[in-house]
Amino acid sequence: MSDDLSELHDELRSVARDLLARSGSGTAVAHGTAPASADWGLLARSGWTGLEVPDALAGSGATFAEVGVILEEMGRAATVSPYLGTVVLAAGALGLVGTSPLRDDLLQGIAAGELVVAVALADGALDHVDAVPPFRLEAGPEGPRVHGRADFVPDAADASDLLLVAKGLDGDPVLVHVPISTPGLDVVDQPVVDATRRLAAVSAVGVVPGEGAVLAFAGDPAHAAARLFDRAALAVACDSLGLARAMLDATVAYVAQRRQFDRAIGSFQAVKHACADMLVGITVVEELVRAATEAFVADTPGAAVAVSMAKARSSEVAVEVAGAAMQLHGGIGYTWEGGIHVHLKRAALDRSLFGSPTAHRRRVAAPHLARAGAAPG
């Protein structure tokens, strides 16, 4: 990454941290209150909703590298917003399809903050990383219909429109746009441990797509669908990194001022070692996420493996760091008022979303096992 780009990202990170604090995000850990929703209009006016939208459609024409910076800060603040579903996945998915009036209208609506769109990509909590379309188009006497189901779809319950990743009539993946009120479409809230996110089960039974609603991926459809899944996994890795950083910062600040036996508990060797272990884990994750982001943006041949390495380790480290933070905060760390539980629960969900650490390690190991003549297991 160039020095100029690194400086830009540092500035974006600083602005994002301040804006999220002013929008009410992050108050749960600071004050032990229930997570507050970020001001979606403020995020839109700041240009965050249109970062990857082309300039011609009122966006910024940026890349996932800039979106990743925002995601890290949202993880740090445990932000409640439909950013993952709408900006990361929906705008990202629309960027992979060919130009059409519908595609352009949706991107413009997302950039302006006027639309909340969710992508029914896959069963996010299942133990796999295969980009298998959860929906399918079936030919009928009156035209194609959509059938299928996807569980744990981020932000679907708050969306006005859905994008269903489906197996097309020719067998290739396609993107199907359906308004939330479409007959045959059912969206049901899925209760999860993390109070900062809303997930839903989306099912389609004989849904009739509107005219021009079936959007073909540009280039290789299978590669595009795989990149969309990798985008989701990398987004969660960025979120995990941000919340792990928040837990380390909160813990260091706490042990520096909490006193026992007339000494700050941060001066105790065991506490120092625990904080050092947290820092080492986060430092490794920072490098993995940076390498995965650069590979993903450049679409290199090894991008999928780099994303899996980042997702597997970041989601594990986030849970470990949040758990250690809860312990080092002592009794207050286990109380509702302490607020540490907000990040711990978010980390637990991050670990499961879009492929578990085991599933991503299996993908990393698959080519090596194939060369050795063994089957991944």
Image (spheres, helix red, strand yellow):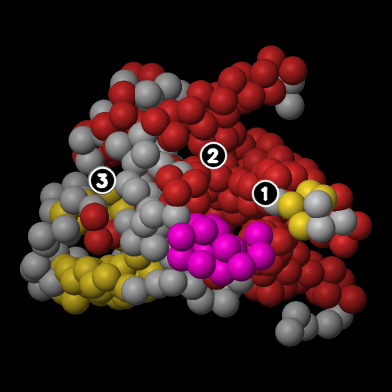
Q: Residue at the far front: name it.
A: 262
Residue 225, given in percent of the width and then of the height, sits at 48, 56
Residue at image location 84% in from the left, 69% down from the top:
368
Q: Is residue 337 on the magenta stretch?
A: yes
Q: Residues within 10 Å of mark 2 (few under 14, many from 20)?
A: many
Q: In the rendered image of this protein, does residue 92 appear above or below residue 190?
A: above
Q: From the image, tell me which residue sits under label 2.
A: 73
Q: Quadrant where the N terminus lies?
A: top right
Give residue 138's position: percent from left, percent from top. Answer: 25, 72
Residue 126 seen in the current view: yes
Dots 2, 1 in contact, CB < 8 A: no
Residue 86 is inside the magenta segment: no
Q: Quadrant of the C terminus?
A: bottom right
Locate residue 144: give its quadrant. bottom left
Q: Residue at x 31, y 24 (%)?
A: 45
Task: Decide which of 172, 121 is in the foreground and name it.
Answer: 121
Name the dominant secondary structure of the magenta segment.
helix
- The residue pinned by badge 1 equals 254
Residue at 57% from the left image edge and 63% from the top image edge:
332
Q: Residue 290 falls in which quadrant of the image?
A: top right
Q: CA–CA distance between discs 3 and 1?
A: 38 Å
In 3D space, how far apart are the residues under numbered discs 2 and 1 (Cα atoms)? 21 Å
Kindly report the distance in space between the C-alpha atoms of the residues bearing marks 3 and 2. Answer: 20 Å
| N-term-proximal mark, 3 vs 1 | 3
Which residue does the numbered mark 3 point to in the structure image? 116
Q: Which residues are magenta?
A: 329-346
